[in-house]
Every structure is written in C-alpha cells, then in structure tokens.
Amino acid sequence: MDWIEDALRKFGQQLGIEDLRPGPDGELLLQLEDGSQVGVERCECMGTDESLVYALVPAGYQAGSRLRMALMRCHELSQARWTAQVGLRGMGPDAMVLVLVRVPSRQFTAPVLGDAIEHLLGWMEFIRRSA
C-alpha cells in the first residue's frame, strides 16, 4: 500500500506537515482545534480494498438531534459525488457524530483525499449548526 502512504505524505506536505503517515494500526487521526477529528484508515470489506475518510464532530447530549439532521442531509445529497454515511461514536457528553466517505484504495491520491476532506468539512459545519 505504498501509494496510500505516498498520498498521505503529499497531502501532509500541502498542509505543512512533514512525514504525515498512518500509525502502526494503519489509522491516521488528526485532532482539530474545535475538538473535531479527521481520520483515514484502510478497510478490506467483502473483498473490496478501500480507505475510509471520516470526520468526528463533538455533539454531546445533542447527538440524537444532530444525527437525525445528518440522516436527512444524506437523503438530500444521495446523488452527490461523495456518498456519506453517518453514525454516532460514544455516549452522553462524549458523543460524536461520525461522517465517512469511502475511497477505493487504487483511487486514493492526495487530490482525492483533499476533495474528500473538503466535502467532510462542509458536513462538519452543517453538524455544528444543526441542533
């Protein structure tokens, strides 16, 4: 999977982060100033090799209403270039809304990663405004 690590390194250089690479478990997780997180991890599911690019947005006790809004938005954007999947991680004050997109590993490049993250940034803003 050298091309995935190469794409991450090139993407990191665009952000000013030298030698950006996944950890030993194959996952990369970046913490943002507002407590949100952006992650990338490889997944082999049912014979398909893909990378999951995802965002986690703190939701706390508003997680249920924010998830409901995110599910409605998934329906509205079902024909968008990036098909998003949403869910929750954690409970109570630690609950976070998860939004992810799937990238076939052979299509994983720095520009594709940047495009996917740009899409997720829009989702993150939507979730923060929802309540």
Image: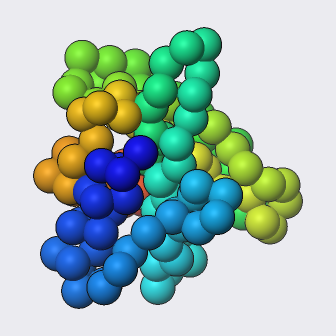
Q: Nearer the viewer, residue 14 or 92?
A: 14
As displayed, is residue 105 above or below residue 31? Answer: above
In the rendered image, the quadrant that contains the N terminus is: top left
Q: Is residue 107 left or right of residue 102?
A: left
Q: Residue furthest front?
A: 2
Total of numbered circles in the picture? 0
Q: Residue at x 35, y 80 (%)?
A: 19
Q: Position of residue 119 (x, y in %)?
A: 27, 47
Where residue 110 sits in the image (x, y, percent)?
A: 20, 55
> Residue at 84% of width from left, 59% of height from top?
92
Name above or below for residue 61 compared with residue 88.
Answer: below
Instruction: Please tell me in which quadrant of the rendered image residue 56 appears.
Output: bottom right
The answer to whether 102 is drawn above or below residue 31 in the figure is above
Toward which corner of the image does residue 102 lie, by quadrant?
Answer: top left
Question: Seen in the image, is 111 located left or right of residue 92?
Answer: left
Query: Could you tell me which residue is drawn at 58 percent across and 55 percent down?
Result: 26
Q: How far across and how far down the image is residue 39, in percent?
A: 50, 58
- Is residue 65 shown left or right of residue 19? right
Residue 38 at x, y = what percent? Answer: 47, 62
- Colour option used: rainbow
Up the image or down, 11 lies above or below 66; here it is below
**Between 81 and 110, which is closer to the camera in this rendering?**
110
Query: In this rendering, would 72 be left or right of 83?
Result: right
Extreme-top residue of the structure? 46
Q: Nearer the viewer, residue 30 or 107?
A: 107
| Residue drawn at 32 percent across, 18 percent down | 78
User: Residue 42, can we see it?
Assistant: yes
Q: Is residue 120 visible?
A: no
Front residue (pair 26, 34) = 26
